[in-house]
Image (tube, rainbow, N blue to C red):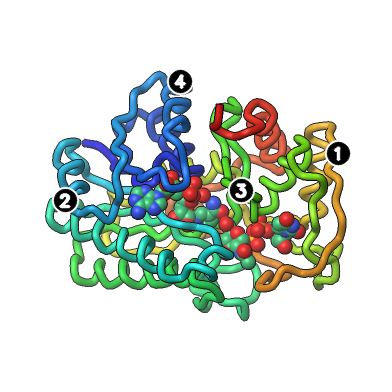
Amino acid sequence: MSILITGGAGYIGSHTCLCLLNKGYDIVVVDNLDNSSKESLVRVTEITGREIPFYEADVCDTEKVIEIIKAHNVDSVIHFAGLKAVGESVRMPLEYYENNLVSTLHLAEAMVKTGVKKLIFSSSATVYSADNEVPLTEGGRLGCTNPYGWTKYMNEQILRDVSVAHSDWSIVLLRYFNPVGAHESGKIGEDPSGIPNNLMPYVSQTAVGRREFLTVFGDDYDTPDGTGVRDYIHVMDLAEGHVAAVEYAQRFTGCDAINLGTGVGYSVLDMVKAFEEANGVKVPYKIGPRRPGDLAMVYSNPEKAERVLGWKARRNLIDMCRDIWTWQKNNPNGFKK
Ligand code: NAD
Ligand code: UD1
């Protein structure tokens, strides 16, 4: 029995592959390498000593996915594959709706045709509408502000409907908060193409000298120091959350949404300070205007994950900052040689 990992060469996927292999699971990866490199999986093999069956293919290709499922005796799927840049999704909505929705539709069709009934889906805290109180619980109101977010929202709805029609399926919708960090070896990590949109890749690229300074997007929010507060979660904790979700899918049927966060919010300036302290480096920054669409405070109530999955985040801010820096220092240009 194998687990099919779509988008497994990407940031969260590669860390999850590592955890699954270390736990003794067999996996097979399908990725079109649109936003990743095969090198991430080569490194996972170096770390774990286990080969990874890999197919460079598009998840929208139903026949190919059916062939892979049959060849590897797949019984569960973790669906990471998708486009994820918020700003790009505003400029290219059709590409986002097409890739992110068609991939899920065709993957689910391949699962129906092959009798695979367990699916873990990468959702996001971005599905919660801005008018919720924090901490965010799974029953919060849903609603989005950009095409990327809507693709997550619509995928959740599609999968809820699939679970009604197929009552023996197990579908887990994992709503990630802000994944950061890297495996402690520094061999794999986040490798954004172009100028990073997210805070921590920008911080580490500034520290390594690839960027001159960080722009802090606003210091006039209603937060303790005026800068935005988020729930940063170490990518290895997140990866372990997926292992717990795979195990949960063995013992329940239906469709369940679960937050994966720490429950603790840190501000932009907290993150800069922690990064400087953990690594003994300077992160020059300037205060700039707010980024349109940003909220003051977003953090999770993580209780459901602990209750249902038996999982909770174990790593702290210093672990996150140290591991990002080990990865960044050892790989200043990411996976590129
Ligand atoms: P990533 O871009 O590093 O990984 C996604 C992978 O999917 C890439 O390797 C890409 O090449 C592949 N892919 C995209 N479309 C594909 C297709 N049609 N067929 C095959 N492969 C395809 O992103 P990530 O940060 O690892 O995110 C993984 C998932 O988690 C995504 O669905 C993302 O939306 C979601 N998510 C990410 C974050 C975050 O902050 N990183 C937060 C919430 C949710
Ligand atoms: C962003 C996306 C969200 C997505 C998430 C994970 C937006 C509006 N939201 O969330 O949909 O799910 O990434 O990929 O894009 N910051 C700076 N300077 C920077 C970068 C960020 O000050 O150069 C601040 C932001 O204002 C925010 C915090 O850092 O307060 C975190 O930003 P980011 O890493 O982009 O994550 P989110 O905004 O939470």
**Labels 4, 3: front one:** 3
Mark 4, residue position: 46
Q: Amino acid at mark 3?
A: Gly
Q: Position of residue 253 (x, y in %)?
A: 26, 60
Dot label at residue 218: none
| Front one among 17 and 84 | 84
The quarter in which the N terminus is drawn is: top left
Mark 1, residue position: 282
Q: Amino acid at mark 2?
A: Glu
At horizontal 18% and vertical 55% (from top left) the residue drawn is 110
Task: Indicate left or right for 226 with 317 as reference.
Answer: right
Q: Work out how far the residue at label 3 is from the one at label 2, CA to CA, in angstroms.
A: 33 Å
Task: Say if residue 226 shows up in the picture.
Answer: yes
Q: Residues within 10 Å of mark 1 (few under 14, many from 20)?
A: some
Identify the mark nearer the N-term, 1 or 3.
Answer: 3
Q: Work out how far the residue at label 1 is from the one at label 4, CA to CA, in angstroms.
A: 32 Å
Q: Work out how far the residue at label 2 is from the one at label 1, CA to CA, in angstroms.
A: 51 Å
Mark 3, residue position: 194
At horizontal 69% and vertical 71% (from top left) the residue drawn is 295
Cβ of disc 3 within 8 Å of ligand 1? no
- Callout 1: SS: loop
Mark 2, residue position: 63
Identify the mark nearer the N-term, 4 or 2.
Answer: 4
Identify the mark nearer the N-term, 4 or 3.
Answer: 4
Quadrant of residue 294 within the rendered picture: bottom right
At horizontal 76% and vertical 44% (from top left) the residue drawn is 211
Identify the mark nearer the N-term, 3 or 2.
Answer: 2
**Labels 4, 2: front one:** 2
Task: Indicate left or right for 307 with 27 as reference.
Answer: right
Cβ of disc 4 within 8 Å of ligand 1? no
Quadrant of residue 62 within the rendered picture: bottom left
Residue 137's place in the image compared with 56, above or below, is: below
